[in-house]
Image (cartoon, helix red, strand yellow):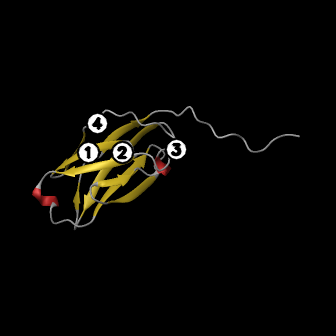
Amino acid sequence: MLTQLKFRVINQHLTRFDSFSPVSGSKNYLLASFEFLTSDWDSIDTKTAVFVNEQNIKQEVAISDGICFVPFEVLTNSGYIYVSVYGGDRITTNSVPVFIEASGYAEEDETQDG
């Protein structure tokens, strides 16, 4: 099972309720799950998660069955990413910060002197 950041949506208020500490550099690993707990979201067919990092890289991802991947583009560096949701003709939520820890992984330099 893949790791998930877990969020709840009540009207326009988004809160995070897990304690996982994500690490930068991951790709196709970290999921975000969203529970929509109020009826104002029931008739909204298209829900979109918005992820923005401190380098102002923004990615929007469709939420399917309450889940989406956190895009690797916002996980390239340590620091905060900010998560929000919108849907329909437009319900928006507040933005929630998530701290991304630094990775110990470094890609090898493919150029070699010789």
The residue lying at 38 percent from left, 42 percent from top is 3
Left/right of residue 12 with respect to residue 71 in the rendered view = left
Earlier in the chain: of badge 3 and badge 4, it is 4
**Mark pair 1, 4: CA separation:** 8 Å
Task: Tell me if mark 4 has few (under 14), some (14-19) or many (20+) residues whose alpha carbon lies within 10 angstroms of its own.
Answer: few
Three-letter code for the amino acid on which mark 4 is drawn: Asp
On the image, the x and y values in percent for residue 30 come to 41, 45
User: Relative to residue 50, is residue 16 depicted above or below?
Assistant: above
Q: Nearer the viewer, residue 30 or 50?
A: 30
On the image, the x and y values in percent for residue 11 come to 15, 52
Residue 114 placement: quadrant? top right
Three-letter code for the amino acid on which mark 2 is drawn: Tyr
Q: Nearer the viewer, mark 3 or mark 4?
A: 4
Residue 59, numbered label: none
Residue 76, numbered label: 3
Residue 7, numbered label: 1
The residue lying at 52 percent from left, 42 percent from top is 25
Q: Mark 2 sits on what residue?
A: 82
Three-letter code for the amino acid on which mark 3 is drawn: Thr
Earlier in the chain: of badge 2 and badge 4, it is 4
Earlier in the chain: of badge 1 and badge 4, it is 1
User: Which quadrant does the N terminus fall into?
Assistant: top left
Earlier in the chain: of badge 3 and badge 1, it is 1
Three-letter code for the amino acid on which mark 1 is drawn: Phe
**Mark pair 2, 4: CA separation:** 15 Å
Callout 4: helix, strand or loop? Answer: loop
**Mark pair 2, 1: CA separation:** 12 Å
Asked whether the beta carbons under mark 1 and mark 4 sit within 8 Å of each other, the answer is: no
Q: Mark 4 sits on what residue?
A: 18
Task: Tell me if mark 1 has few (under 14), some (14-19) or many (20+) residues whose alpha carbon lies within 10 angstroms of its own.
Answer: some
Left/right of residue 20 with respect to residue 102 in the rendered view = left
On the image, the x and y values in percent for residue 23 come to 46, 36
